[in-house]
Image (cartoon, rainbow, N blue to C red):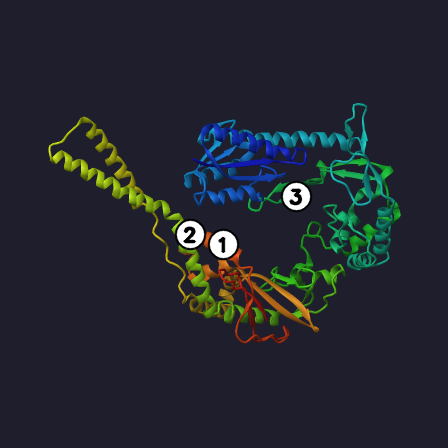
Amino acid sequence: MKVAIYARYSSDLQREASITDQFRMCRLRAEKEGWQVVEEYSDHSISGSSMIQRPGLQALIMDSTRGRFDIVLAEALDRVSRDQEDIAGIYKRMRYADVKMFTLSEGEISELHVGLKGTMNALFIKDLADKTRRGLRGRVEDGKSGGGNSYGYDVVKKFDAHGEPIRGDRTINAAQAAVIRRIFADYDSGLSSRTIAMALNRKGVPGPMGREWGPSTIHGNRERGTGILNNELYVGRLVWNRLRYVKDPDTGRRVSRQNPESEWVIQEVPDLRIVDQNLWDAVKARQGELAFSTRTRQEGNPLNDRRRPKHLFAGLIKCGCCGGGYSMISKDLLGCSTARNKGTCNNRVNIRRDALEASVLNGLRKHLMEPDLFREFCTEFTREVNRLRMERGADLEVARRELDKVGRQISQIIEAITDGMYHPSMKEKMTGLEARKAELTEKLANADEPPPLLHPNMAALYAQRIAALSENLQHEDSRAQAAEILRSLVEQVTLVPEGGELAIVLRGDLGAILRFAAGKKDPDFLSEAEALDNLLAQSGGSLKPSRGQQKTSALNATEVSQLSLVAGVGFEPTTFRL
C-alpha cells in the first residue's frame, strides 16, 4: 500500500519541529503496517479552520486524484482540518479517489469520525476563541494592549518574578511620534492625505511595518477607526472590540465587521498620548467637512451617482516599472496608482482606456493563438500525453499478459481433465484461476479510454469565438457576459514605458484559452492536466519569435507582434508585445 503523510502546526506558538515529530511518528506507523511512504505534505504555521489557503493540503487533494497513493496518514484528524465543512469535503474527495484516511489517534476514518470529531473540533475552536477574547478584555481593562501594535509605539518586554513575559505594555517611539504629529499638522493645514504620503516617501520616512506610505494608510476609515488620523490611542484613549473578524468561506481570508458601539471596551491611557487634543479636534472637524457617509446620510453617498463603471480589464493591468496597478485617473485615462498615490514610481505615462481595450482585444483576436505555433504546441502536447499514458498504462499491459497466461493455464487444466487426468487439487487450482481471470477482465473492461487530444484546427475555432465576443461587446444586452469571458482569458496586461510611450505586454491564461477554444465547460483534454504542467515546467528554453515582429505605440496601437515561449519540448502561455 502506498501512503502519503500529512502534517501541520497551526501557529507561531508551536515549534517548527512539530512537523518533524509528526512525520517521524507517522513513518514509524507506516513501517509497522508494511506501507510504503511515497509522499509527504505539510503546512507550517497555518490555522486548521480553513483549507483554502493551505498549499500542502491543496497539493495532497490534487495528487489524490492522480492515483499517487492509496492512504493518507496523519497524526490526528484535527491536523487535517478543524472545520466541519472542510473535513467532510476532504473525506468525500478521498473516497471518490479511492483513498483511505488513517490517523494515529482515531485509526481508519469513517463517516462517524467525520461527524463527531468535526463537531468537537469546531466547538474547540469556538471555545478557544471565547477564552482568548476574555483574556484580552481583562488585559485592555488594565490599560494594556489587546493585541498587535500601532505605529508610534514600541512593545515593552518585561518578565515577572517567575520569568514569564508580561504582555501588553507599550511605550512611545519618539521618532515615529514626531511623524504622527507632522501628519496631523499637515492635514490640519489643508494638505490631502495623498500629498502627505508622497512627501513622506520622497524623504524616505518608513511607514508602518517599514512599508511605503499610501493615502489610505493616513486617512483610513473614520467610522472603523483605521488609519493614522483615526487612531484614538494617539490622544490616550484605548478602544478595543470596535471590529470583529470573520473568515470568508470562499476565500479563507479574514473580513472585518464593525461591532455596535455598546460592545466597545474603552480605557483611558494618558501616558500614551501623542497628539494634542486641540489638534485632534481640528483634524476631526476637517474630516467631518469632507466626509460623505452612507451611515449618516439617508440619501446615501452623493459620489455613488458619479462613480463610473469599471473598465473591461480592470484589475488585470499592471505597471511594468513597479508592478503596481493601473487605475482610472480621469474619465478616459489610466495611470500608475503607485506613481500617483505614493510617488515611489517614476512611470508617469498614461494611456487612454479605449485605446488599451482596442489593443488588447486586437491581440486576443489576431495573435493569441497563431495557427502555426498552436500546431507546434499540439504536437508537443500529444507527445507528452502519450508518454504519460505509456507510464500509466504499463500496469494495464502487465494485466493483459497475466490474463493471457491465466487463460492458457485454464485451457491446460481443461485438456488434462479431457484426457482423463484428474486430482482434487486441480479443482482448487481451477477455482483460483477463474477468480483471477474475472478480476483481470473487469479491470481491463473498466480502464478509461484515452480522451481525444487537442485538434490543430482549434486555433481557427478560437478566432471565430473571439470575433463573436468582440461583436457581443457592442450590444448592451450581451456586453456583460462577453466581458466576463474575455477577462477570464487574460492573466495580466503589463504596461512598460518606452521612449515616452507605453508598450503593452499581454499574457493569456493557457487553461482558460484552451477551454474557451474547445467550447466546453470541462473538455476531455483537461484530464491530462499533468501533461500541461510538465510542458510549462520544461519551457524555460530559448525565445522563438514569430513572423513579422512589429512594435507600435500603445496610444495608437493597431498591430501586434508576438514573442512565444516555445522551448524544444515545452510550451508556455504566450507573451505578447503590442
Secondary element at tag 2: helix
- Quadrant for the C terminus, please: bottom right
Q: Is residue 139 left or right of residue 532?
A: right
Image x and y of residue 59, in percent: 52, 44
User: Which residue shows up at 85% across the image and 55% down it?
Assistant: 188
Q: Which residue is mark 1?
A: 534
Secondary element at tag 1: helix
Q: State if disc 1 and disc 2 touch (CB < 8 Å).
A: yes
Image x and y of residue 266, in percent: 77, 36
Q: Nearer the viewer, mark 3 or mark 2?
A: 2
Q: Nearer the viewer, mark 1 or mark 3?
A: 1
Lower position in the chain sequence, tag 3 or tag 2? 3
Q: Is residue 523 visible?
A: no
Secondary element at tag 3: strand
Q: CA distance from mark 3 to mark 2?
A: 49 Å
Q: Which residue is mark 2?
A: 388
Lower position in the chain sequence, tag 1 or tag 3? 3
Q: Residues within 10 Å of mark 3 (few under 14, many from 20)?
A: few
Image x and y of residue 10, in percent: 62, 36
438 over 112 or under it: above or below:
below
355 over 491 or under it: above or below:
below
Residue type of the residue flagged with mark 3: Arg
Query: Within the image, what quadrant is residue 401 found in?
Result: top left
